[in-house]
Amino acid sequence: MFRGISASKGVAIGKAHLLDQSKFCIMKYNIAPDDVEGEISRLRTAIEKSKDQMLEIKQRAGKVADKYAVILDTYLLLLDDDILVNETIEKICKEQVNAEWALTQIHEKFTALFNNINDEYLKGKQDDLDLVVQGILRNLIGHHQESLSEIQEPVILIAHSLSASDTLIMPRSLILGLATEVGGKTSHLAIFASAMGIPAVVGVKDLTLKINSGDTIIVDGIDGHVLAHPSEKLLTHFQKKSESYALYQKKLLKNIHQPAETLDGRVIKLMANIESGHELNALKKFGAEGVGLYRTEFLYLGVDQLPTEEFLYENFKKVAQASDPYPVIFRTLDVGTDKPLRNLQLEEENNPALGLRGIRLSLVYPDIFICQLKAILRASLYGKVKILYPMIVSVSEIRKANQHLEKVKQELRDKQIPFNENIEIGAMIETPAAAICIDDILREVDFISIGTNDLIQYLLAVDRINENVAHIYQPFHPAVLKTLKKVIQAAQNHGKKVSICGELGGDPIATLLLIGLGQVDELSMDPHAIPKVKKILRKTSQQEAQAFAQKALSLKSVSEINQFIISEMKNKFPDDFDHNLDYLEESPLAPMDSEDEPENIF
Ligand code: PEP
Ligand code: MG
């Protein structure tokens, strides 16, 4: 059994599909003069094969995502590149060396050139070239590497890591479960898996060394375990756990039409976090009252060209219309860390989480920002549209962003393009600076949305996607609770709406605490989480929640707070927390060493 971090709840049982992300070592050997022609033809055959493979993937990818098909066009162009091919052939002839070696040498030469080039766009083509060369080398060696889009049967995907672009192209309906070596609870992969309802475990050390494609494995996203070659007894146990979990989820769905209110009548809006228009169906299914966070950056990832205003407008309009009469909060572009932009050739940063991301990037590249603002404003006619600025650290960023917004509004007025003049503007509160200056920020905006994923990362100085420090990523750290209280209270004092849209907002173990900290108006989360959070809400009173939060705030250490929250929540809601769910009957797994048990309950 391998331990990791539970990233998306549920249990998956199936055959492993190990994503081969390896590179290989190329040996040099000399060839006889008579064999030179044969070597060149071997190279040409490998290139032709690469082209066929790319075309085939392109055809299949087109069905999954049009944008991915465009990326493949770039690869095809590189395969037709005369310089790469001709120089490799020249080297084979001149030095009488094998094709793999010649190609690797030419590739290295290009890499050195790319590194010295000032043109950022060309520099960015390096990754594409690497990928194409790896493909040709595989064909020369006879080693086939599958693309994610080639998966044709239900599998559990095992990988070192999966990028945001990988998640865009994988055939989601065929992915039963996911397990990766890297990542944390709030990494993009965890958010993606949870949004798709795919059980996932991340941060499992050396997993790819221990599992082969075709192995029967179990991904237990409830407790964060991966099991390979399970015995009959374990299989039966986990099948039951999977069925009971599915049944529990189904029962929860019964409350979706009931109001999200406490026993004493306090109403809290439960909204959805989405990353694309594809997730809109889930809104109705799980009873979401609108979109509390649309992470618009996913329209920019995995594509070569930046999206046009028209493309964004059509997408935003569709989302606004589908959510109407409920609101949609469009968060402006927030790339960085595990969401890198490939269509804007940015310098590689040593510390991307502290780098040019969120509103900083929008202010440095106003054209991109303005294009997005125009599209949102135009879409504002079709529903209750709001704008949210990410990664705010100062009021001046909000003011500068609003200046751009004003200019865009004026331009639309001049062109007689209608939009909602009174569109509401909000700031994400996800940095310590924003929390400390909360009163000043509240004077500049109509509402705030607390991004706990980043707020915890920056408050505790702990990388949210680094599995090595996942045990320090403690949502119930006293500093986090005190900060949340300060921010929520400030919003209440200013009469401004406050939402919580980080993963904590959708974690039912935190529901009582969060609503007890003050007047939280909205919780926005992965739509799958809504029914359970609603169930907790409906079984508690405001008074009870306040007393609960007060007690948690009085405790000094993370372990005391965790212990208090877990035991109280289990006591108050015996049917809803793991130890009492029927899927957690006596486990046949060996008990863990208590020294080993992490403090982290997430
Ligand atoms: C957050 O930081 O809590 C948040 C909601 O934004 P993201 O996870 O996209 O950084
Ligand atoms: Mg964030």
Image: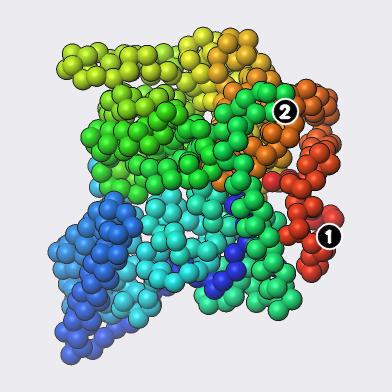
Q: Is residue 102 above or below residue 441?
A: below
Q: Please tell me how many numbered marks the rendered image carries.
A: 2
433 or 283: nearer the eye? 283
Colour setup of the view: rainbow
Residue drawn at x 78%, y 22% as measured from the top left: 543
- Residue plotted at (41% across, 13% down): 399
Considering only vertical position in the picture, is 171 above or below 339? below
Between 493 and 418, the residue placed more toward the observer is 418
Q: Name the residue under label 1.
A: 593
Q: Which of 78 and 295 is in front in this view?
A: 295
Return the disc, 2 or 1, that comes first in the chain's sequence: 2
Query: What is the crowding at mark 1: few (fewer than 14 residues within 10 Å), some, or many (at least 20)?
Result: few
Residue drawn at 70 percent across, 73 percent down: 236
Question: Callout 1, which amino acid?
Answer: Asp
Q: Is mark 1 within 8 Å of ligand 1?
A: no
Where does the image place residue 7, in percent across and percent down from the top left?
Answer: 60, 51
Q: Is residue 549 visible?
A: no
Spatial separation of the CA atoms under disc 2 and disc 1: 41 Å
- Local SS, label 2: loop
